[in-house]
Image (cartoon, rainbow, N blue to C red):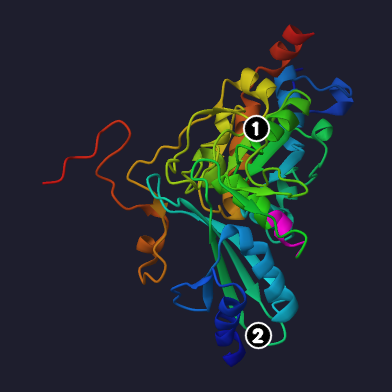
């Protein structure tokens, strides 16, 4: 682990624009988006972070600026250390980040997922299609301005949509998100359920005193 | 001299090899006793569906052991699992490819109502896109519950005016 603690310091020496990032677990570093690929290349080739664990992103809120941040989680199979690299996207409405597909083929699907759910485009990506939602879906569901229940959208197959008159309607929330309570001793309480059943779509939530 | 009629059952020696019954009864008996399921296993309910086929639960007792992976050869689609919006058109297309007469069992909470997946990605009940005959509660339902649904569907099939429907469609 000592080697990994030095990684951020060494990187700061090589890339002066990088800053250490507050982290509860592994060493983390903020990098400017333009230097992200160079930093990742350096981590892979000079610090033996040979394994790309995850590429993901964060939406900090509709009004936040920078609104989107891209994260790369790296692991070294030789020193068994992790490191997290974060880069803020410069454009808040149409975020773009550089692809890491050339460094790790594993980045391909992770970046497609990040694009699908958060709408962060990866430039130079060989095949930037949606991976979970269907082609042509107009929204990016993990964005903060997208409701969990969804937004009324035609079905992926228009012909089937025409026959069935069905659309991807907002799901009934009746009592808020449907969540499980892990760790609950009483299994009936632990089962996934709405936490606030005082309201439904037909009966508004009573105003709190 | 008049002899007492002791014949309680059908006697081939007297009546010949002829059975008199109603067309509906015969057709429905055939249909309900040989339901070939189309296993639409989309999630964990699919595992219980597989269990229903093994010897402990033995769906063959009800003539429904012939799982067909071709919609052309199946009578009853068992939708076992969560139907996402991305999957929904394919479920509908497979249903359309099944030959009449056809039935649908919505197995489990997800197929019946979306279950615990109240989200943008999940179809809130497969009855939004295909007509469902029997709903099975449970998450996932035990194989006995599926067998119960099958028996209920057999009862439903036996009530159908099969002959009239056949004449109407001919």
Magenta-drawn stretch contains B96: no
At 62% from the left and 83% from the top, the residue drawn is A81
Secondary structure of the residue carrying numbered label 2: loop
Circles 1 and 2: CB atoms closer than 8 Å: no
Magenta part of the chain? A104-109
- Residue A192 shows in this picture: yes
Q: Residue A105: say if magenta.
A: yes
Q: Is residue A175 left or right of residue A44?
A: left
Q: CA distance from mark 1 to mark 2?
A: 41 Å
The correct choice, above or below, for A54 with respect to B99 in the image is: below
Circle 2 packing at 10 Å, graded few (<14), some (14-19), many (20+), is: few
Question: Looking at the image, can residue B5 be seen?
Answer: no
Task: Return the residue at label 1.
Answer: A136
| Residue at point 62%, 23% (across, down) | A161
Where is residue A104 shown, x and y percent of the image?
Answer: 75, 65
List x then y, in percent, for residue B92: 68, 30
Q: Nearer the viewer, residue A37 or A173?
A: A37
For the residue pair A129 and A70, the one nearer the viewer reads as A70
Give the image quarter of residue A133: top right
Identify the disc placed on residue B58: none
The spot of residue A19 in percent (x, y) is 49, 72
Residue at x 60% of width, y 82% of height: A10
User: Quadrant location of residue B131?
Assistant: top right
Residue B8 as seen in the image, left or right of residue B129: right
> What chain does mark 2 sit on?
A
Q: Earlier in the sequence, mark 1 or mark 2?
A: 2
* Point 74% across, 62% down: residue: A106
Q: Nearer the viewer, residue B9 or B27?
A: B27
> Chain for mark 1?
A
Q: Residues within 10 Å of mark 1 (few under 14, many from 20)?
A: few
Residue farthest bottom in this picture: A2
| Residue of label 2 | A80
């Amino acid at each position: 682990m000592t080697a990994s603690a030095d990684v951020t310091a060494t990187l700061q020496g090589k890339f002066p624009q990088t800053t250490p990032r507050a982290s509860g677990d592994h060493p983390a570093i903020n990098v400017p988006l333009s230097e992200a690929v160079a930093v990742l290349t350096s981590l892979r080739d000079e610090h033996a972070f040979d394994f790309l664990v995850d590429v993901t992103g964060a939406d900090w809120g509709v009004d936040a600026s920078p609104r989107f941040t891209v994260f790369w989680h790296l692991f070294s199979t030789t020193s068994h250390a992790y490191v997290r690299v974060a880069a803020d996207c410069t454009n808040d409405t149409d975020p773009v980040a550089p692809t890491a597909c050339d460094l790790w083929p594993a980045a391909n699907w992770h970046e497609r997922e990040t694009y699908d759910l958060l709408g962060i485009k990866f430039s130079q990506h060989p095949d930037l299609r949606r991976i979970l939602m269907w082609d042509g879906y107009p929204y990016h569901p993990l964005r903060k301005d997208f409701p969990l229940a969804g937004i009324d959208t035609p079905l992926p197959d228009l012909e089937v949509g025409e026959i069935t008159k069905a659309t991807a309607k907002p799901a009934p929330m009746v009592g808020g998100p449907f969540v499980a309570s892990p760790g609950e001793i009483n299994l009936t309480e632990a089962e996934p359920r709405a936490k606030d059943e005082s309201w439904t779509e037909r009966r508004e939530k009573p105003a709190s005193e | 001299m008049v002899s007492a009629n002791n014949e309680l059952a059908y006697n081939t020696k007297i009546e010949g090899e002829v059975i008199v019954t109603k067309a509906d009864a015969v057709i429905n008996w055939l249909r309900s006793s040989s339901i070939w399921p189309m296993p639409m296993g989309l999630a964990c309910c699919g595992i219980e569906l597989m269990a229903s086929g093994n010897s402990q639960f033995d769906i063959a007792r009800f003539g429904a052991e012939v799982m067909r992976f071709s919609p052309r050869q199946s009578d009853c689609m068992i939708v076992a699992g969560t139907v996402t919006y991305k999957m929904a058109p394919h479920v509908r297309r497979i249903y359309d490819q099944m030959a009449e007469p056809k039935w649908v069992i919505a197995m489990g909470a997800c197929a019946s109502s979306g279950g615990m997946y109240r989200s943008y990605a999940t179809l809130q009940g497969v009855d939004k896109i295909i007509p469902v005959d029997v709903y099975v509660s449970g998450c996932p339902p035990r194989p006995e519950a599926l067998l119960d649904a099958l028996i209920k569907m057999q009862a439903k099939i036996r009530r159908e005016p099969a002959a009239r429907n056949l004449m109407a469609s001919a």
